[in-house]
Image: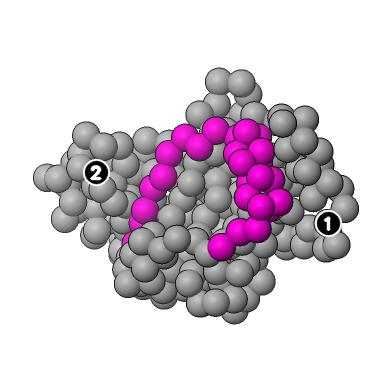
Amino acid sequence: MKTLLTLILVALISFGTKAQEKASSLYLLFEFMHVDSQNSGDYWQIEDFWSGIHKQRVADKSILGWDLWSLTPGGIKQGSQYLTVTLFPSLQSMLQAINSLDVMAYAKKAYPKKTDKELGAMFDKTGKARDLANQILLKQVDRTKGEFTMKVGTMITIDIMKQLDDSYEKVEAEIFKPWHQDMVTKGKKGSWELLRAILPAGSQAYGTHLTVSMYNDAAQLSSFMEGSGGEMDMMTSLAVKEGFKTREWKELKVGTLQMMVR
């Protein structure tokens, strides 16, 4: 039986009628923030200040955009309470930003009326308001088709995956992506994408990939989570079960878009 299921999976992957659609070059920096309850007010003020800097970076074309997401559940003992996502057009631009970003120069452009002392005080406040719990460098490797526009209030699910087999990305493309595309086409979700972790890397890394789905609001997300996911024929169902063996599902995070810069 195991051999039969494997052959079905291989057949679906090898003889699929549609090749995987290549995602455009998009690199993402995910930064998970730990914020204590007593610092939540300062944290919002800090991110509002940083959003001005990110607007200047977008204007200078050093980044494509920046987002701030609140995470659910948000208990202080449950990990990170917020996530910032910075979008880059290339790996080089992302690495340069991480290693040699002149933050003060951008701050002066964004806030020309503030003194060096005032800007320095905001940077000091940044360090006290939150702890950078995790930083992940990612590349977008696949996505669904569709015209979905993010807005404040958009909700997101992030599934953290650990690849167990080299066929994992192909399995996502040939088996799982069509299911997500059907959900997008039917208006049950806004979009889906597959992200590959660049760093951290290695056998001890917590995860290797993220799958990200977006929803218009809480109503669309809850409707999707409470739904059955639709019908599958026997061959697809068997292939899905085999596909699950190519990765370990580590964790699910849910977020709500609070700020965005484009």
Q: Which residue is mark 2?
A: 35
Amino acid type for the residue under numbered disc 2:
Val
Instruction: Find residue 70 and report its image quarter.
Output: bottom left
Region rendered in magenta: 231-256
Q: Which residue is mark 1?
A: 16
Give the residue at x 26% y 48%: 73
Asked if residue 203 lies left or right of residue 218, the reply is right
Asked if residue 77 lies left or right of residue 48, the reply is left
* Residue 35 vs residue 235, the one in the foreground: 235
Amino acid type for the residue under numbered disc 1:
Gly
Q: At numbered mark 2, what does the secondary structure look like: helix, strand or loop?
A: loop
Instruction: Find residue 225 and report its image quarter.
Output: bottom left
Q: Nearer the viewer, mark 2 or mark 1?
A: 1
Q: Number of marks in the image?
A: 2
Quadrant for the N terminus in the image: top right
Height in image: 214 above or below 150? above
Q: Is residue 242 magenta?
A: yes
